[in-house]
Amino acid sequence: MTETWARYEFPGGHSPVPGLSHLVLRRSTAAEHSNSWIQLDFQKDRTRLFSISFLVTSLDFLFPGPSDTQILRYCIFPGEGAPLEFVSRKTGNAIPPKLGLLEHLLPRSNTHSDRVMPFFSEGSYLGQRIRKTETGTDDCLFKTEGVRKLSLDEEILIGTSRPFRDTGVGRLHPPGESWTEEDKDYEYTQLGPGDYQRMIEAGMNIFRVPAEHLDHVLEEPVFFLIRETYESSPDLLYRSNFLGSVMYMDEPAWLIMSNHLADQIQTPGAAATLLCELTRGRYEGNGNYGQRDLQKLLGQAGYAFSEYELLQPDYPCWETVASSAWYEMEAGIGGWCFESRIRPVWFSELVKNVLNVDFPSDPDACIRYHLALFAGAAGRFKGKWGVAVYGQTDANATELLFPMAYRRGASYFWFWTSDRAHHVPFEEQLAYTQAFRQFVERNQGAMEAAPATAVSFPWGYLCDQYTLNTYYDHAEPRMWFSRHMALDSKNASEVPYGKVLQTGMQEVAHLLESDTPFDILFLKEGELAPEYETLIRVNEDASLDRVLQ
């Protein structure tokens, strides 16, 4: 009779997962249109810890190297709690674990010559050796029909990064009012089960949770991030709604500028290079904002992957410097989210006073300008992007921001919780989320076409409120907060930086006034953008090139 399962041990007891001693790989003998059900049991001795079951189009994922296998269905059977099947809200297709089921989380043979498939003789799992010890023919597959489905929205992630809320006193800091660190803050309280339920019902679907809140989101149709409980919950890695430990990288551009790290840098290109290097270093490093943070936490919890790396692939920068999106995404991070404090009239006056450009003062135009920065960067570097509402955001801009960003292809729709004027009250967060979800339901697929026009500033330049305003120890507008890049200082072409920005912002203002869709780019000399029909290139001598492509 055909073997239906094989049991594997870790020679020398070198298990990569705490408490795991054996893997049992099972295959259904009942073909489903030439596809195969595979079940993997994770055991401590003979006791099952948890199992996963998935329907695949082939078994080549059990060999070394890349696989063309498609996962058609994916289920988890925890040791405790309900069995779950993970599916896409949009398509109904299977959603496998975000850390890469076929690429990283399954055992596989060491060699293509071991053709006793699917039950190879020797292989590896998470960097540790495994060896087949016995086989059998009894059918112990879990039934997948009738398993509760979690329908996950991968395209729109709405939420806040905090596990607490304000106590419901209303607004303490209206948008636009000045404030100091000595001003009264809100009172906060930990989120309870009822709060999570209200947030989920309103449409929020991404949560960063402490261990004591995990049960509030574990079996809900939402994504979650967590930094604890790995030693007792190895099944977290196999839950498709688990995103990892890092929700975002915090403000690399603002870190450079607020700490005056570019103060002595003399050119925009050198400052942008510093930002790219800082962002890339944090992303590839072992710190709390790096893609190796999860592996570090797993190691502290007793996981032992040998030389194997389990990287968290998908999270954004959360940043306040709007035009830094280009450089941070160029550095390699897969997403970007704007800390929106948009105040349209104030921004329009800033552009007028500093650059002598008549810039539209309506919320629609101000938002379109900022979205052009983010969509342009994301399109160039194939990443996701989004926007976050802060307490300083004008109310009339807040109402438009999420819908306009959605129609331009945004994925992140976040709120900031805590810190006086930065805080968005809890009830406002719920109301904005519910209204936005209703907008999405009414406008499914009503996305804006990709713009045919792009405006390109020179690579290394910035143009946002932090460039045009005065801050801290400088009383004149500067790029990168550098004393060498005040806007009346001259660049390598002996033209004031402000003149270059003025030329570009005049073109942007014309596009906004004519209702012409556009993206904003920051191209190096000689770089092209063939995905656009028209490229309006702003040169360092403040001249313009209009390139029809």
Image (cartoon, rainbow, N blue to C red):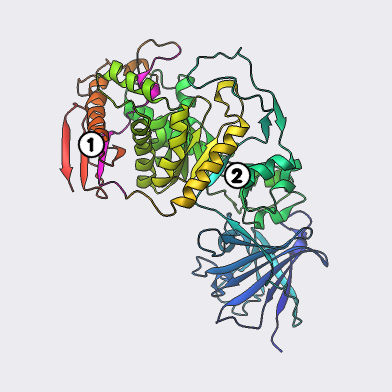
Looking at the image, residue 76 sits to the left or right of residue 263; the answer is right
Q: Is residue 216 above or below residue 510?
A: below
- Of labels 2 and 1, earlier in sequence is 2
Query: Disc 2 to disc 1, how far (Cα)?
Result: 37 Å
Which of the 4 image quadrants contains residue 33? Answer: bottom right
- x, y percentage for residue 125? 65, 62
The residue lying toward the viewer, choosing from 23 and 11, is 23
The residue lying toward the viewer, choosing from 411 and 10, is 411
> Which residue position is annotated with label 2?
202
Q: Quadrant of the N terminus?
A: bottom right
Q: Is residue 479 above or below residue 100?
A: above
What's drawn in magenta, residue-wise?
Answer: 450-472
Label 1 crowd bin: few (<14), some (14–19), many (20+), radius 10 Å: few
- x, y percentage for residue 354? 30, 17
Label 2: which secondary element: helix
Label 1: which secondary element: loop
- x, y percentage for residue 215? 74, 48
C-beta proximity under 8 Å, tags 2 and 1: no
Q: State yes or no: residue 420 in magenta.
A: no
The amino acid pointed to by label 1 is: Ser
Q: Is residue 382 above or below residue 177?
A: below
The residue lying toward the viewer, choosing from 176 and 217, is 176
The answer to whether residue 480 shows anywhere in this view is no
Which of the 4 image quadrants contains residue 94? Answer: bottom right
Q: Residue at x 61, y 33 (%)?
A: 427
> Which residue position is annotated with label 1?
514
